[in-house]
Amino acid sequence: MRLRDKVVLVTGAARGLGRVTAVACAEQGADLVLLDVCADVPGVPYPLGTPGQLEHTAALCRETGAAVLTAVADVRDEGSVRAAVALAEERFGRVDVAVNNAGIAAPSGKPVHGIDEDEWSLMLDVDLSGAWRVIRAVGGAMCARRSGSIVNISSTAGLVGYRHFAGYVAAKHGLVGLTKAAALDFAPMKVRVNAVCPGSVRDDRLTEGRMLAEIARSLEVPHEEHEGAFTEAQPMNALVEPADVAAAVVYLAADESRRVTGSVLTVDGGFSAR
Ligand SMILES: NC(=O)c1ccc[n+]([C@@H]2O[C@H](COP(=O)([O-])OP(=O)(O)OC[C@H]3O[C@@H](n4cnc5c(N)ncnc54)[C@H](O)[C@@H]3O)[C@@H](O)[C@H]2O)c1
């Protein structure tokens, strides 16, 4: 019960890594605030989470005994992010941990000079500015309480480049930079900010994640071959499992990491060590 009595907010919680992370936090005793856009976003060429998927994550968390609040909110919209945080503070009194997990993998698949203005803006708005908006919404109260942990889900794309993914790579590198800058701003108030950089994570059917499939689609890797193609690039010859990422988040959320801030924890089977 490493998160007993903690209130954890997870963005992008309807499915995938957000779902697994939320359930892992619930299993460690946390109460949960589950936020997701629960709608398709114009310009993102694949379906995003649904209200039914968000409710399913909530049900899985409740099965562990957690109290759960769900909020439909788009991290591009400051008002809806602030409203969700206000609702959480009203219900639970505070947010102890914020996990900035919501993200999109596309529009991608073009060389940098082929990306248009709208595609670039959309990617940065969700994958970088979305995390900044959540940090703004929870940061003041965390600083006032002299306690809090923020975990930003970046990517190996926050550490190295990938061809035809300039927007995603720039956003995820930006998220690493935001992590370090926010960690320094908040350190005197004992509020911690860290990043997790997952490598290629298997799209677990139980969690309904679909990012690896969408990255493959942007790269025009045939669907039935994509897991093998990504696995070949892994030093450990295995994809990362969603639970591997969730375990890193639990560590950074819990008090056992109380002197860890501004750090970047890679969960990539050695991919970025080369
Ligand atoms: N899956 C991987 O291989 C991998 C690797 C490295 C990093 N990541 C990162 O992990 C995070 C989760 O990825 P995933 O694989 O679970 O993806 P996913 O597409 O399966 O799930 C993403 C969730 O975020 C939500 N979301 C998207 N835009 C949103 C918005 N504007 N506001 C609120 N919610 C929004 C979606 O509805 C969806 O439920 C992302 O930030 C991603 O970049 C994933």
Image (cartoon, rainbow, N blue to C red):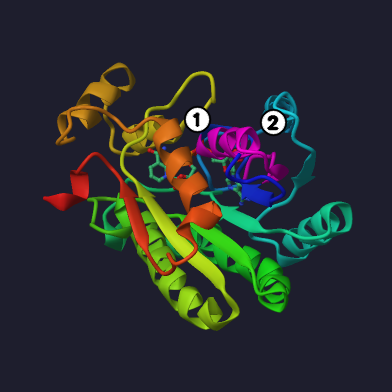
Q: Which residue is mark 1?
A: 209
| 84 sits left or right of 6 in the view | right
| Disc 1 residue: CB within 8 Å of ligand 1 | yes
The numbered mark at residue 61 is 2
Q: Nearer the viewer, residue 161 or 86?
A: 86
| 236 sits left or right of 111 in the view | left
Q: Nearer the viewer, residue 250 or 12?
A: 250
Residue type at mark 1: give it: Gly
For the point 56% across and 61% down, the residue is 150
Q: Position of residue 3 (x, y in %)?
A: 62, 46
Mark 1, other Cα within 10 Å: few <14 / some 14–19 / many ≥20: many
Q: Report the residue that reaches farthest toward the top.
A: 224
Q: Is residue 115 visible?
A: no
Q: Position of residue 265 (x, y in %)?
A: 35, 54
Q: Position of residue 101 (x, y in %)?
A: 53, 49
Q: Is residue 136 above or below residue 111?
A: below
Mark 2, other Cα within 10 Å: few <14 / some 14–19 / many ≥20: many
Element marked by disc 1: loop
Q: Is residue 207 above or below residue 176?
A: above
Residue type at mark 2: give it: Cys
Which range of residues does the magenta coloring cover?
17-41
For the point 79% across and 38% down, the residue is 67
Element marked by disc 2: helix
Q: Is residue 112 visible?
A: yes
Q: Report the residue that reaches farthest toward the right.
A: 90
For the point 50% across and 39% down, the residue is 45
